[in-house]
Image (cartoon, grey):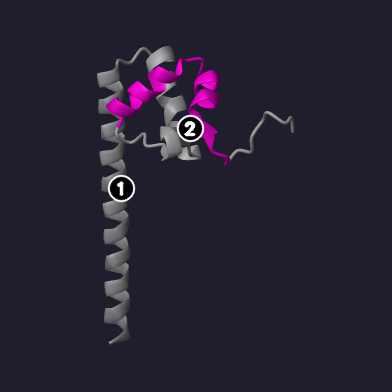
């Protein structure tokens, strides 16, 4: 592995991530104001460090805006819809678990 290449789970600086996607750093800072899901770690001097989930989200936002032609508002709506869908799926999963536990308790009586 070259010295400049980081491990998959390593934190990325804003400069590294900006260079990776070919956008200036100020664009990433702007995206942080538009996408509340994007919350990099901030250290002394307000230095930003992006976790693997943040990196994946930045790549996704970049793809949607640059390659798929979405607007900022369109990406915001898409991400909000996906979050809502995940929440509904999670609720259904939890209800199924609850129901199976209730059935098991009834069977033990």
Residue 55's label in the rendered image is: 2
Question: Magenta-highlighted stretch: main secondary structure?
Answer: helix
Residue at position x 32%, y 76% in the image: 104
Residue 106's label in the rendered image is: none
Magenta stretch, residue numbers: 9-35
Residue at far front of view: 45
Residue at position x 43%, y 34% in the image: 45
Residue at position x 25%, y 40% in the image: 84
Q: Secondary structure at mark 1?
A: helix
Tell me the quarter of the picture where residue 107 sits. bottom left
Q: Nearer the viewer, mark 2 or mark 1?
A: 2
Measured as percent of width and height from the top left, residue 79 is found at 31, 31
Residue at far right of view: 1
Which residue position holds label 1?
89
| Residue 14 sits inside the magenta stretch | yes
Measured as percent of width and height from the top left, residue 56 is found at 47, 32
Tell me the quarter of the picture where residue 108 sits. bottom left
Where 88 falls versus 55 (above or below)?
below
């Amino acid at each position: 592995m070259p010295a400049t290449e980081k491990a998959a789970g390593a934190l990325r600086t804003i400069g590294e991530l900006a260079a990776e996607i070919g956008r200036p750093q100020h664009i990433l800072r702007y995206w942080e104001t538009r996408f509340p899901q994007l919350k990099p770690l901030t250290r002394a001097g307000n230095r930003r460090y992006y976790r693997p989930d943040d990196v994946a989200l930045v790549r996704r936002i970049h793809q949607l805006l640059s390659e798929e032609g979405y607007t900022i508002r369109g990406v915001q709506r898409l991400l909000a819809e996906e979050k809502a869908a995940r929440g509904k799926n999670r609720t259904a999963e939890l209800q199924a678990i609850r129901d199976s536990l209730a059935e098991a308790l009834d069977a033990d009586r």
